């Protein structure tokens, strides 16, 4: 049994294991869309309700 070296595997056409693959961006799958005011209000209400019900302090969230 002969051990396969890195040089041997490259000659056979195998890719280097550390080579990074290019990933597709999420933004290429959808177009940005404006939310309706009512939808934004509902989302904000549910976030607030979640914090209150789960007893999570509001200062946990870092404002970016």
Image: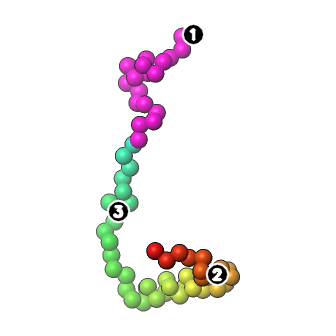
Which residue lies under the disc numbered 2? 57
Residue 13 in the magenta stretch? The answer is yes
Would you place residue 63 above or below residue 45 in this image?
above
Front in this rendered view, residue 36 or 50: 50
Tag shown at residue 55: none
Measured as percent of width and height from the top left, residue 62 is found at 53, 75
- Name the outermost residue toward the top: 1
Give the SS element for disc 2: loop
Binning the other alpha carbons within 10 Å of mark 2 as few (below 14), some (14 to 19) or many (20 upward) gives: few
Q: Which residue is mark 1?
A: 1
Give the mark nearer the N terminus: 3 vs 2: 3
Q: Nearer the viewer, mark 3 or mark 2?
A: 2
* Chain-order first, disc 1 or disc 2: 1
Residue drawn at 60 percent across, 86 percent down: 49
Pointer 3 residue: 27
> What SS does tag 1 mark?
loop
Q: 64 left or right of 33?
A: right
Q: Position of residue 8 (x, y in %)?
A: 43, 17
What whole-number distance in Å separates the C-alpha atoms at marks 1 and 2?
Answer: 63 Å
Task: Kindly report which numbered mark, 1 or 2, lies closer to the viewer in this rendering.
Answer: 2
Distance from Cα at disc 3 to Cα at disc 2 = 32 Å
**Could you tell whether 50 is left or right of 8 in the image?**
right
Residue 24 percent location from the top left of the image:
36, 53
Is residue 62 shown to the viewer in this render? Answer: yes
- Magenta segment boundaries in residue numbering: 1-20
Hey, which quadrant is residue 59 in on the image? bottom right
Q: Residue at x 56, y 76 (%)?
A: 61
Q: Is residue 43 magenta?
A: no
Whether residue 12 is visible here, answered yes or no, is no
């Amino acid at each position: 049994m002969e051990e396969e070296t890195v040089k041997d595997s490259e000659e056979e056409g195998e890719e280097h294991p550390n080579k990074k693959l290019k990933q597709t961006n999420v933004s290429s799958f959808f177009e940005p869309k404006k939310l309706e005011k009512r939808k934004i209000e509902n989302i904000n209400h549910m976030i607030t309700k979640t914090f209150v019900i789960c007893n999570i302090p509001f200062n946990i969230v870092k404002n970016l």
